[in-house]
Image (cartoon, rainbow, N blue to C red):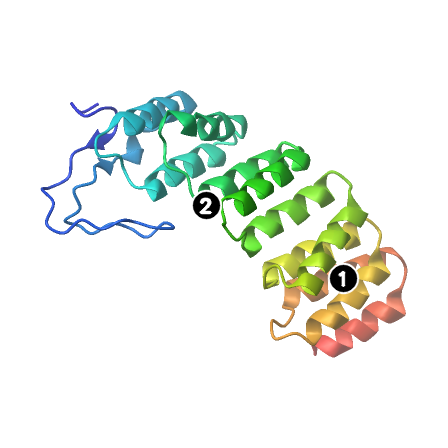
Amino acid sequence: MTSQGRGVTASPPNLGDRDAVHGVPPSPFSSKPKVDFSSINDVDDAVCLFHDMVRMQPQPYVFQFNKLLTVVVKMKHFCCPLSVRQNASIGAPVNEITMSIAVNCYCLLNRVDFGFAILGTFFKRGWEPDATTFNTLIKGLFLVGEIAEAEKLFKKLLSEKLCEPDEIMYLIVLNGLSKAGHTLAARDLLGFFENMSCKPNVYAYNTVIDGLCKDKMTDDALYLLSRMI
């Protein structure tokens, strides 16, 4: 631990400090403190480092707080980032990425309903959720067996153009539908996917072909395979 706190050291004098917005790294001449994440061995270390970072003047950039939360998530301590996020009231910076991390944690805890509550915060703050946030929510709905709701959300994103679906979103929906036994719906979605600018990859085809084979729809599976070749 340094004199500034666990894993936190002061930076060189300010020679042109700039804000790190939405995760953009700071200038090497920034006056913001640097954070040493190598000091984290367990979740208790992470919590101590978080409180040290909050007390620093000036505080580290928000992307560094988000990096800390991501480290804890990788430890599979999904509740801890939520309590840390709630401590934003004591002065920790928060942005869209922070909230997306919280949404992910709720979904991993099978509390996708709380994830949607966080989504409301996005809109209240004037933030626009991106595909990553919606991907997390759709996957969370599939994880808790809310197949119809996952489909409904996906179709709403398309019809209302709330965000631009990416390849990952299509894969999540295809995989969720196939695993839930909605094989024909997955096949039809794959056909729709083929007409989009973001074309399906081999994983998308494999997912649907596997579902068709499990449902003994071998002719459909072979036809789909022929379209890949």
Residue that carries the numbered disc 2 in the rendered image: 97
The local secondary structure at tag 2 comes to helix
Image position of 183 with respect to 23: above or below: below
State which quadrant residue 116 falls in: top right
Q: Is residue 64 visible?
A: yes
Q: Which mark is residue 38?
A: none
Name which residue type carries label 1: Val
Q: Residue at x 15, y 39 (%)?
A: 11
Q: Is residue 222 left or right of residue 150?
A: right
Residue 162 or residue 109, whichever sits in front:
162
Q: Residue at x 16, y 34 (%)?
A: 10
Q: Residue at x 59, y 42 (%)?
A: 120
Residue 207 or residue 115, whichever sits in front:
115
Q: Residue at x 49, y 50 (%)?
A: 127
Image position of 76 with respect to 178: above or below: above
Q: Nearer the viewer's eye, disc 1 or disc 2?
A: 2
Q: Is residue 22 left or right of residue 140?
A: left
Q: How dense is the environment of label 1, judged by Cα within 10 Å: few (below 14), some, or many (20 and up)? A: many
Name which residue type carries label 2: Ile
Place of residue 93 in the rendered image (x, y in percent of width and height, measured from the top left): 37, 36
Mark 1 → mark 2, Cα distance in angstroms: 32 Å
Reading the chain from its start, which is encountered first: label 1 or label 2? 2
Residue that carries the numbered disc 1 in the rendered image: 208
Q: How many marks?
A: 2
Q: Are marks 1 and 2 in contact (CB under 8 Å)?
A: no
